[in-house]
Image (cartoon, coloured by chain):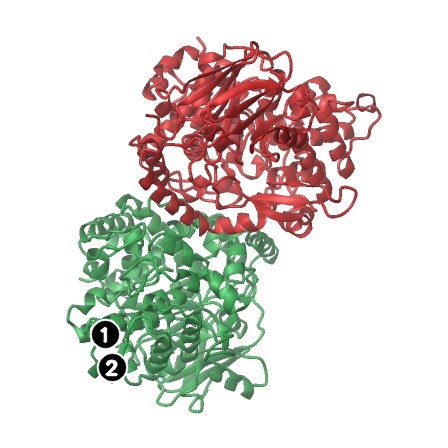
Chain colours: A green, B red
Amino acid sequence: MAFAFTGNLLRVDLTHGRVTPEETRLDWGRQFIGGSGLASRYWLEETPAGVDPLGPENRLIFMSGPLTGTPSASASRYSVVAKSPQTGLWGMANSGGSFGPALKWAGFDGVIFEGASSDPVYLRIDDGRAELRDARGLWGKTVPETEETLQAEADRPLTVACIGPGGENRVRFAGIMNNKHRAAGRCGLGAVMGSKRLKAIACSGKSPLQLADPERFRRSVERQIAYMDESVLKIGFDTFGTNMIADMVNVRGGYPTRNWQMGQFEDIEQVNAQAINDQILVEGVRCYACPVACGRGTEIRSGKWRGHKGEGPEYETADTFGAMCGVSDLNAITMANYRCNEYGLDTISAGSTIAFAMECFERGILTRDQTGGQEIRFGDADLIVELVEKIGRREGVGDLLAEGTRVMGERLGQDSQRFAMQVKGLELPAYDPRAAKITGLAYITANRGGDHMTGYIQGPTFIDIPFLIVDESSIRDPFVANPDEAHVLVDMENALTVLDCLGGCKFMGVLLTAGDLTELISAATGWDFGVEEFRQSGDRIYNLMRLCCAREGARREHDVLPARLMEEPLPGGPAAGMVIDRATLEAMKDAYYARRGWDAATGLPTPGKLAALGIADLAGNLPH
Amino acid sequence: MAFAFTGNLLRVDLTHGRVTPEETRLDWGRQFIGGSGLASRYWLEETPAGVDPLGPENRLIFMSGPLTGTPSASASRYSVVAKSPQTGLWGMANSGGSFGPALKWAGFDGVIFEGASSDPVYLRIDDGRAELRDARGLWGKTVPETEETLQAEADRPLTVACIGPGGENRVRFAGIMNNKHRAAGRCGLGAVMGSKRLKAIACSGKSPLQLADPERFRRSVERQIAYMDESVLKIGFDTFGTNMIADMVNVRGGYPTRNWQMGQFEDIEQVNAQAINDQILVEGVRCYACPVACGRGTEIRSGKWRGHKGEGPEYETADTFGAMCGVSDLNAITMANYRCNEYGLDTISAGSTIAFAMECFERGILTRDQTGGQEIRFGDADLIVELVEKIGRREGVGDLLAEGTRVMGERLGQDSQRFAMQVKGLELPAYDPRAAKITGLAYITANRGGDHMTGYIQGPTFIDIPFLIVDESSIRDPFVANPDEAHVLVDMENALTVLDCLGGCKFMGVLLTAGDLTELISAATGWDFGVEEFRQSGDRIYNLMRLCCAREGARREHDVLPARLMEEPLPGGPAAGMVIDRATLEAMKDAYYARRGWDAATGLPTPGKLAALGIADLAGNLPH
């Protein structure tokens, strides 16, 4: 009996158009839990080393977690795993809303896509049955058009995950969208989906989930929701959304501005949460079963885009299209966000890539010849919307920008890579490590590349949020690089990885202790899951993911920041004059690898470490 | 040159009516900083051991800190030190508003009162001059009447600290009030003031303060205020005041209800911050130079007290007059708060004492004979207001209640002491240690008795607030008693003691790191004050205070909780069935004393510890 899991997966051979249900490998369940952990285990097993991320051999795996679709608060998420066209390594993205729950209620823990279809198709799942259907009529449609067309043709309510033109056109940072506005955005997994000519997954159904101890689970959830309901973070996020933190990061001097040339934005008041509330907010939006309405339902109320509605911008988007591009026009930022959602593009990478192009153009590295005569300068509000559209369609200069900053930097040369603000090909989120050194360590140790959700170290550095889920989340002085604090990052990465596997939102880690979570896990699954196992599971799964990356070539020397952060001091603010220098970063890496029990020379798990984690059988994936 | 200090004190001999300025002992300044630290050093030097707290030999010492009156945010406070009539030990209270700054601008760091006047007097200080004046006409007046009368007779704006009828009548938990509604409430120091027939201190003046490096100080303050301005806590406190946390503590099952018979209040929605906002809030109120308006300017808008205005209730008051007394009528709670402010009574002790009386009455321990026929039962809203008035006037049963729970328990006997909810005579604040064990350790190690502001351990336990001021403020699982975490409490106590000495509010410890604070201290005083010295100063001053208590007889065996907390399990909520048992508490004490470097048998500093802190000269105060 598979408590909390449906016990069934779908295997979809796109090359031959075959859909086959199979049992979920629950023998892997307790070791890798679910979500990104279980998906990664499948991916490592089934995808050969060194495949083309956009080729048919790359497995694309959707996976829910054991808490997904239960009444547990903030556990609405599903993960997607595939080799990433941005990083060339293990890639992962996840998303909230209600698609994860819908997939489980339709009868399946996850879906493994293999091969590629010659013509566009979509997968229709309904109450334990599934089939591939013709999607030629959907190809070219935006995300909302796709959802609406599918819904119009259906005889029951559907929940849809799909790609837009961005994924179809294999924009390197295309995401997978669900509930129209929610994105499994990072790592370019929308491009992988596009490469397989898979337009959408549409779910319906009401299969009930069996929990091991429903009464114990109900009590745990009741307490969990009560805690969240009464938290100061809920007050903040309900009122201001995630962009609440814009002022906090800006005041600490780490708010990336004009492609990271500065750490404070002079027009912050025009793009912060108060500005959103004053100008565009309609209502807060919740994910399935979450008491916190941190999403922003918005409408542009003035100017040329007046009347457009959607969701966002969230914090990252407001920075990457705003301060990063030198743009203080909130309507333009919001419209660029809407267009990203319509085309299915990751907003962090899209905004960062445009900002990079602006700096390249202003420095004469990107020329009018290459832009088709177009001026690409900081502060041009209309331009950011126009460029998003061009990227989504790979039109004109958008074809170059669709490659993201790493490939652009390689193509443009002229030392532009030093300010291509990415790690391992993934564009960085909006927290400058020069103003909180350990953030830099987090960017280079995150398995999916320059990412902030893997370790969420901005919590205890930039935004004063304690993570109860780990024993100790204090960072003494963010300005000071302290290798002794690497253990905080390791613990955070491990714990937050478990959240991804469960189907949980990172905010669960703020308000709940590891004990609260193991109580939920045990009651749902019937496993006798304690805090010790919680910590070890996180470590095991983190090592699994590192192993996936190692197999594709990741080594210590790839754990490095853009030269700008290591060599160009911030010009102003509290961190004025600061960099995170190479030697310091290497010392932090040493401490981090030591804490992980990894080899100092390669930065990879040792066979002994894998054995200690009970995954000695995977040691063959280490370089010989 | 005394940077940040005025360099002058007032010595007031009340017996002989003499006022003499003298130089502040700045040779003590760097060791004991200011505020409660410097005042305690004076108190230990000048008050003989074993005096009657209400006798003329007890020194009553008002002291500001080096940051008081500077533009630094949240540093408006002054401290008062004297032997406490509640605990019979070293007593301390402090308060915000603007009295501390006004005292310094009037030309003095502090005032030492000795002796006692035969007739009521008040101290008038104006720009470096001071004199005692006749206060016979003020005796008997309430706090607002006193302030208004003084102001009406003055030719310039005054800032006043005074006592009401509570202090005059030596109510054991009378406080000292300033700015009408702000209280240096705890330890009964208003009774000490009353015993000296000192009605008030009234300040005016604009003496400028010299800072060591004004430009560096200005920059530090600018950054400090910017950080605070953008914090999520500011959002919460501005919007909801300190009573924001009522829901958080209640949901965790540690919200003292009906004299700690329960840990959750069924009518929480009628007395929480939202209820205050909906029913009585007029506006948020700030202390001098603070960006956070956590004070509540309120007005009763319905019922028999309609039209009454004032400040409060804050969190503690809302619990002690509300849930603790089984009262859900917010108007009555607010009116009881107003009356406490008018009579000059500590709201925590007042509400707790009334709750204790209610339980004693319902159990037949307090009889109609003793109450003059009055019924004193839980849930009687009108009664709490009436009893506050009777306590303030020592009228009828109020004369008994004016003694507080410890003395009442001693007098009533019949095992009532087991639920007299005090430690060392000081009534406990509103966080039940059965639902967060380390809170219990904090209550017994706080030098002034059962207190929550000394260690603020409810921050990381009940309300998810991280204290950046210490290296590590995480408590793994509040329900679990973990002696290994005693160091967290020690570090918090040390750091927060420094805040009191500086003139700082505890909320400075939430948003600023120790590095931020030492920057402020160094720029203000000219001392080269580093984080290491910050930590050691806190330890030194904490030991000084323990030494003051030791001299008056405090020992390990007095570090103990009311029997109810150790023996009666909570009946419901997340901590249902839990106590904090004696053996566990003793183990936590062992760990705490060990961390402090104190003697395990006596719970007191050793001569070696004092020597290590540079105060070997004070070892003579240890028991022989």
Q: Which residue is mark 2?
A: A371
Q: Amino acid at mark 2?
A: Thr
**Which residue occupies the foreground of this view, B566 or B321?**
B321
Q: Position of residue B519 (x, y in %)?
A: 33, 38
Is residue B441 visible in the rendered image? The answer is no
Instruction: Check if mark 1 and mark 2 are on a common chain.
Output: yes
Q: Quadrant of residue B451?
A: top right
Q: Is residue B276 above or below residue B109?
A: below
Task: Please report, as a chain letter, where disc 2 is located.
Answer: A
Q: Position of residue A21 (x, y in %)?
A: 46, 77
Describe the element under mark 2 as helix, strand or loop: helix
| Residue A383 position by quadrant | bottom left
What residue is disc 1 on?
A361
How far apart, in angstroms, are the residues tagged by discs 1 and 2? 9 Å
The reply, left or right, for residue B225 in relation to residue B416 is: left
Inspect the image, locate mark 1, and give the three-letter code of the amino acid beneath it: Phe
Q: Name the element at disc 1.
A: helix
What is the crowding at mark 2: few (fewer than 14 residues within 10 Å), some, or many (at least 20)? Answer: some
B471 or A554: nearer the viewer: B471
**In screen coordinates, is B528 left or right of A381?**
left
Residue B160: percent from left, percent from top? 57, 29
Task: Please identify the quadrant where the N terminus of chain B is shown.
Answer: top left
Compare residues A18 and B481 and report the one nearer the observer: B481
- The reply to whether residue A55 is in sight is yes
Instruction: For label 1, count other residues whose C-alpha is less than 10 Å away and answer few (under 14), some (14-19) or many (20+).
Output: many
Q: Residue furthest front?
A: B155
Query: Relative to residue A491, is residue A361 depicted above or below?
Result: below
On the image, the x and y values in percent for residue B203 come to: 53, 28
Instruction: Classify residue B570 as left or right of residue B592.
Output: right
Q: Assess whether mark 2 and mark 1 are in contact (beta carbons under 8 angstroms).
A: yes
Chain letter belonging to callout 1 = A
